[in-house]
Image (tube, coloured by chain):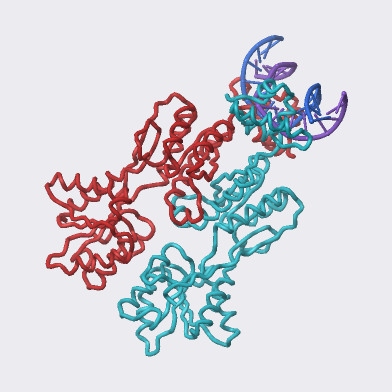
Chain colours: A cyan, B red, C purple, D blue
DNA sequence: CTGAAAGCGCTAACAT
DNA sequence: ATGTTAGCGCTTTCAG
């Protein structure tokens, strides 16, 4: 056991409350005393016991990040960990810690209720992947600082934060239009399952609609191989498109291969653009122009919101959308 | 504030110590009383205050996972988060929580010292990326439960755990030999910087040495593009190798493209194998035979060790190496 | 089998 | 500017 406040106080010849105040930089302690006590603390290697402090203060400086942490999620969803990383950095800056916790979707309502009631943490960041209506009731009933990462897929009055996929789509389209491209093909995933692609398409349509232009969309491209095959077909046309826009890096690889196979030049003969910078749009040949979202920054913002909410619990429920970023590279 | 043990005790007409014991399943409380108290607790929605409990018990059930959490690490090092995920799952199973904490390498010694002294957690898992000799002294001096993830690159008496890259290399080589392949080319990264490839090569050499065979190694292949170029050269030879073994997925993509470009059949004309399952050896066409390491499992093991160490602090320092796994697919 | 009481180390209101 | 003291909610020893 390391030294306690009592030992430090007696060595310094003051009361424990003076020590406490000095260490917490209270205005009511003279600079001289503060200085002296701090030096002695340093000397003795005294550090306040975090557990006692949490107990006395009735808060422990912990924020929980709750999500489904199934095996493989590190590989399948690195974006989430990038958010976690950003959140951690902001929190530790402010003296907080981040607990990462597995919360399965089916038991989430009870789990979250318990987390709140047991005071294990001062606030909660939850991944929308585990969000259900039932969970939203739990969150709504308690006045506990929380934030959902990801737009809920039902009507709600929750606090949430998400990427604006619509803006991303619009940004991509506007960029292409600015560059003078007109005939574009958008390769996306399954029309029913791939909500993100659909939201991107909405954005694209807005931008093209303003110019009274249309986008050719090919849906159901769920793999590298399918995108290669579909691109091959596209390249057989009499008039090939000026640019192919892929909804993710995997599709762009298949696309690239078909283009390479035909010995077409990029971007002179046909251009290519993708969403997401991850995992290899910067590694391909040529490097791909991409729309990316700064997930780290998003984590930072989430953490900032939670800490605000802790300070001002009656802060209104709000939602935010983060702005995507254009990375212009060789492929356009 | 939710209910306290006092309220529950008074409702149940017993003392708080009885409640405490009942809830902690002490042997000295009758089953009947335990039953009754638990029911009442449930009914009132009583849950022990985690902060008070940590304080009284002098432990808080928290393990810290410390690593350099710089921006981008979620994408660059998903393996680490897979370990984190595995650790979290084991810990939460045992009633523990996992704090993820950014610890920059340069200040790690002091940071870790503070973490230990402030009792913020009951144990520490540290990524070898932030390990220095100075940090190893700190760890050696204190009797605090810790574990390093990753083999230290200097002599030490630390507790650490790592993937056995040598076994992985040996396993890959033995598999290829078993399949009858003899002429193999190993594509690896920079000979000075890429320690992991070197360790894999050691394993490969052991396996081939036993058969008195040699492996052709081409080093300095650090990108997708380089591997494509080098493979192109290889395929121009009179006698092409039977199989190309790539040290990672990115190299295998370049390799694949060159092979496809030449219209060679895989694995009939030439086979291909890679290390790591991530991020796309299962998505390529054909799917690639790969050696992978279960990082999730490694996290689980790390967590298990830490909890053991907490129970038995004088457990001897030890190190472990996890066994890699062969994923046989279409490319061999 | 149950209860009384002494902490656990620190914070914060109040008194000086 | 500093000290006194009453908690914070629970665990645990000891007595009954």
Q: Quadrant of residue A156?
A: bottom right
Residue A148 percent location from the top left of the image? 63, 56
Q: Is residue A202 above or below residue A85?
A: below
Q: Is residue B20 above or below residue B98?
A: above
Residue depicted at x 58% and y 30%: B59
* Residue toward you, A132 or A291: A291
Q: Quadrant of residue C8?
A: top right
Residue B291 percent location from the top left of the image? 30, 51
Residue depicted at x 79% and y 35%: A28
Residue B263 percent location from the top left of the image? 22, 73
Work out which quarter of the rendered image holds the N terminus of chain B and state it.
top right
- Side (left or right) of A265 relative to A76: left
Q: Is residue B56 above or below residue B237?
A: above
Residue A319 percent location from the top left of the image? 67, 61
Outermost residue, front side: A32
Residue depicted at x 42% and y 74%: A330
- Side (left or right) of B9 relative to A170: right
């Amino acid at each position: 056991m390391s030294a306690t406040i009592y030992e430090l106080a007696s060595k310094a010849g003051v009361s424990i409350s003076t020590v406490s105040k000095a260490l917490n930089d209270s205005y009511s302690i003279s600079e001289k005393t503060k200085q002296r006590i701090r030096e002695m603390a340093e000397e003795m290697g005294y550090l306040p016991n975090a557990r006692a402090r949490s107990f006395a203060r009735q808060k422990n400086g912990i924020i929980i990040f709750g999500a489904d942490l199934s095996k493989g999620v590190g590989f399948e969803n690195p974006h989430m960990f990038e958010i976690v990383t950003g959140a951690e950095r902001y929190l530790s800056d402010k003296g907080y810690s981040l607990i990462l916790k597995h919360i399965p979707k089916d038991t989430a309502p009870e789990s979250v209720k318990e987390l709140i009631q047991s005071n294990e943490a001062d606030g909660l960041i939850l991944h929308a992947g585990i969000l259900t209506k039932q969970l939203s009731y739990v969150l709504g009933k308690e006045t506990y600082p929380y934030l959902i990462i990801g737009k809920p897929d039902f009507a709600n009055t929750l606090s949430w934060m998400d990427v604006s996929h619509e803006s991303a789509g619009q940004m991509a389209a506007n960029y292409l239009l600015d560059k003078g491209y007109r005939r574009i093909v958008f390769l996306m995933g399954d029309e029913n399952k791939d909500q993100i692609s659909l939201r991107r398409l909405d954005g694209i349509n807005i931008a093209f609609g303003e110019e009274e232009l249309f986008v050719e969309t090919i849906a159901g491209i769920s793999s590298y191989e399918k995108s290669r095959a579909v691109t091959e077909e596209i390249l057989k046309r009499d008039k090939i498109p000026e640019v192919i826009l892929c909804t993710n890096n995997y599709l762009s690889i298949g696309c690239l291969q078909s283009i390479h196979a035909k010995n077409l030049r990029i971007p002179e003969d046909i251009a290519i653009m993708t969403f997401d910078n991850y995992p290899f749009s910067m590694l391909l040949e040529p490097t791909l122009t991409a729309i990316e979202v700064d997930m780290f920054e998003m984590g930072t913002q989430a953490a900032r919101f939670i800490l605000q909410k802790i300070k001002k619990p009656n802060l209104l429920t709000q939602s935010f959308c983060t702005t995507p970023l254009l990375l212009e590279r060789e492929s356009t």
